[in-house]
Image: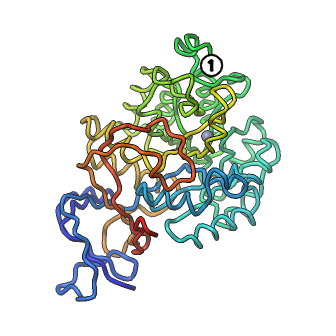
Amino acid sequence: MASILIQGGRLIDPSTGEDRIGDLYIHDGCIAPLPRLVPAEASIVKAQGLTVVPGFIDLHVHLREPGGEAAETILTGSQAAARGGFVTVVAMPNTQPPLDTPERVAWVKEQGDKVGLINVLPSGCLTRNRDGFEPADLAGMAAAGAAAFTDDGTTVADENTLREVMRQAAKLDRVVMDHAHDRELEKKGVMHEGAYSRRHGLPGIPSIAESRVVERDIAMAAETGCRLHIQHVSARESVEAIRKAIRAGLRVSGELTPHHLALTDADVDPQDARYKMNPPLRSEEDRQSLIEAIVDGTLEVFATDHAPHTKEAKAKGFLLAPFGIVGLETAIGVTFTALVASGRMDLLTWVRRWTTGPARILGLPAPSLRPGAPAHITLLDLETAWVVDPAQFASRSRNTPFEGKKLVGKAVRIWTSGREFTRAT
Ligand SMILES: [Zn+2]
């Protein structure tokens, strides 16, 4: 395989804390020591003014295949991830049919490998058909390559079932990821319950619909010894519960989406379902609590919850449109602009939240730029401002509330095991 020399970039290695200007050499799909003489056939990548980091990981992506190909496929989702700067994504199992058997998990993995742009890690359902009652074959799915387990889109409401699947996941040493929400409390809500939902006359989803399930999950994780990860944390009360659990020594983590970081319920346009997601955008007070948590590490990772939907589906209006927004191609810009460019978070911490953080939660080796590590690399331009234009997305869907937003921070290219992704790929 070819050799590559990435020249003169700012190298940031979250596994060592190293931050320096230098060259990075790739040989045979791995990072290698700089040779005294670079072979003439090596390709040279000029990275002056750019930042070189281990490949970003997104723990929460909906690739929609099988069953939702009108909105996204494993191919278009991989292209969107690669353009967005992600080398590894965890694919959610709430497809149609859901990924609740070893065969279906293996199929997604195979398709991801066939596309071959990025590492697609499938997750498996906790319960059969995501019904919340009958445990799925967790051991079989783990053997078939499931990186994690979740019924994302919903929680496992039945507590005996949750206890059983958490025990199994603990035995298999896989993390359980939960979309914490109480459907009874959520009712038919479409946005955060508060002053803005009342002003817009839209039914609200109260914060307690999330936080009390987070508290239940934590109690159950403590009892079963299971590793627990709370998906898309949105409410201040949930942050407090996670903080307390971590202080008590429990293996509990949480993720922050770019949209919950950057937007609040005050931004919601009730005529525009691109602002409709679950959990909903919450109050400014919640947002500040989320920022504090991602800075201090209570929330250890960003994750996009990339949720593509067709134009037709999102055109049904705020009450009827499905929940969710695309995120892969705006995530780096939104999080960098909101936190690093604004001076609230240092660059190394931001890189950790997209690399070593998610790897730790999955139980993978720490992403690194050291010789011997696989050449999973993201090359970033953190200087140039750009404007979000969904027409340019590789994703098959365009449902983003960030259209027209000016951002700083963008992936220039990625390498997966030393193979380069370019826009023509
Ligand atoms: Zn979810």
Residue at the far right in the pictured view: 134
User: How would you rate the neighbour count of disc 1 (Cα within 10 Å): few for under 14, some for 14-19, many for 20 or more?
Assistant: many
- Snapshot quadrant of residue 183: top right
Label 1 residue SS: strand
Q: Position of residue 283 (x, y in %)?
A: 47, 21
Question: Residue visible at 29% across and 44% down?
Answer: 408
Does residue 244 appear left or right of residue 309 in this picture? left
- Please tell me in which quarter of the rendered image ligand 1 is found: top right
* Vertical comparison of 263 with 108: above or below: above
Question: Residue visible at 51% across and 28% down?
Answer: 281
Q: Is residue 269 visible?
A: yes
- Scheme of colours in the image: rainbow
Q: Position of residue 225 (x, y in %)?
A: 62, 46
Name the residue beneath numbered marker 1: 204
Does residue 67 appear left or right of residue 324 in this picture? right
Q: Position of residue 182 (x, y in %)?
A: 69, 28
- Snapshot quadrant of residue 297: top left
Question: Residue visible at 53% across and 53% down?
Answer: 395
Work out whether residue 253 or residue 20 is closer to the camera in this orientation and state it: 20
Is the residue indicated by label 1 positioned so its CB lies within 8 Å of ligand 1?
A: no
Work out whether residue 142 or residue 29 is closer to the camera in this orientation and state it: 29
Q: Is residue 222 visible?
A: no
Q: Position of residue 17 (x, y in %)?
A: 26, 56
